[in-house]
Amino acid sequence: MILKRKYRYVLILTSRDIDASAFSNSISNEIMKFMGELAYSEANPRIVAQYTPRLFVIKSKRGFEDRVILASSFVRQINGTKIGLYTLKTSGTIKSLMIYAKQVKD
Amino acid sequence: MDYFDIVNMEVPEKKMGNLLGYKKILGKKELPVVDGLSSNNKCIVRGGESGILDRALRRNNVIGIIIKDNELIRMSVEEVKETDKLLFLSVHDLTCVDTRTRLRNLYRMRGLLSFATHSKAKVSLISLAEDESCLLSSIQMIEMAKFLGANEEQAKKMINNLGEIQ
């Protein structure tokens, strides 16, 4: 029997606009810095969607989302720019986050 | 459960506060953090000596204390319990400082929270953000409280405590 891998999706708002491509690498590095390499490799956080220049979704393995949230709290600058990351919502499906993100956008 | 926060800057827009999961965010104008006993208005007193903190706790205008450098001053924590006021832990000391200070504050804050919990003193976790980048959402604050050693229920209560005072 093949077990389905389960993930959690975390909706994050940034304090300023960010370019998605430049952001992906630097946010991963920053989160890894605070989580540690071992926890990072288990959690495997990835940016999977960006709704606006300030609103994006990080996917992580279920059970590790609390560490991703905590690590994001400590991130204060990315590429030398001061920035704040705010966790707005976590969910088991990306669809429900999409609905919530639409409300935030409006 | 409604969540509250105190910041050390202008209050962010209400919409932003609600988005971050707070019912209300208090700024430095509504509830300032003062060093010493100089203020007669509603405030939070920050200090590093038990004498000053104990005197502050007996004043009606002081709603709680912040212990400087998060050192464990047992007498003051017990006084917080006796006077039914609040012991504030500032997340700013963890998120907006250099790595060495952060590690020291983490260790001290855990000890402080552990002692305060055993003493049954009311503890409140606040961001005390000085700019937008230091703000945290209520979800992040709950995770931070859990990281400091609180359980889920305690963590939520730590973000909610301020509501009882208002």
Image: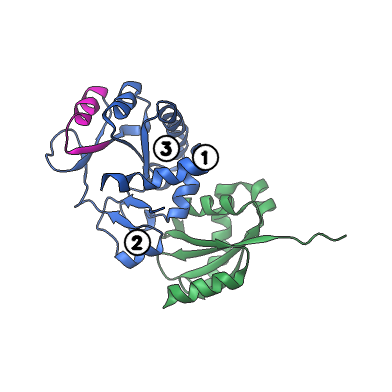
* In this rendering, the label closer to the viewer, 2 or 3: 2
Labels 2 and 3 in the same subunit: yes
**Residue that sits furthest to the right in the current view:** A1
Q: Please state the extent of the stretch shown in magenta in the rendering.
A: B50-64
Find numbered disc 2 in the image and state the secondary structure of the residue it sits on: helix
Q: Are marks 1 and 3 in contact (CB under 8 Å)?
A: no
In this rendered view, identify the residue nearer to me: A13 or A30.
A13
Q: Quadrant of the rendered structure where residue B57 is? A: top left
Q: Is residue B127 left or right of residue A60?
A: left
How many residues crowd around disc 2 within 10 Å: few (fewer than 14), some, or many (20 or more)?
A: some
Chain holding disc 1: B
Q: Position of residue B158 (x, y in %)?
A: 40, 43
The residue at which mark 1 appears reads as B151
Q: Position of residue B157 (x, y in %)?
A: 42, 44
Residue B17's tag is 2
Find numbered disc 3 in the image and state the secondary structure of the residue it sits on: helix
Q: Quadrant of the rendered structure where residue A24 is? A: bottom right
The residue at which mark 3 appears reads as B101
Labels 1 and 3 in the same subunit: yes
Three-letter amino acid code of the residue under disc 1: Asn
In this rendered view, identify the residue nearer to me: B160 or A11.
B160
Residue B153 in the image: above or below residue B18: above
How many residues crowd around disc 3 within 10 Å: few (fewer than 14), some, or many (20 or more)?
A: some
Three-letter amino acid code of the residue under disc 3: Thr
Query: In the figure, what tint was chain B given?
Result: blue
Q: Is residue B149 left or right of residue B3?
A: right
Write the residue at 57% across / 50% down: A67
Write the residue at 48% across / 76% down: A102
Query: In the figure, what tint was chain A given?
Result: green
Measure how far apart labels 1 and 3 are at the Cα level. Answer: 25 Å
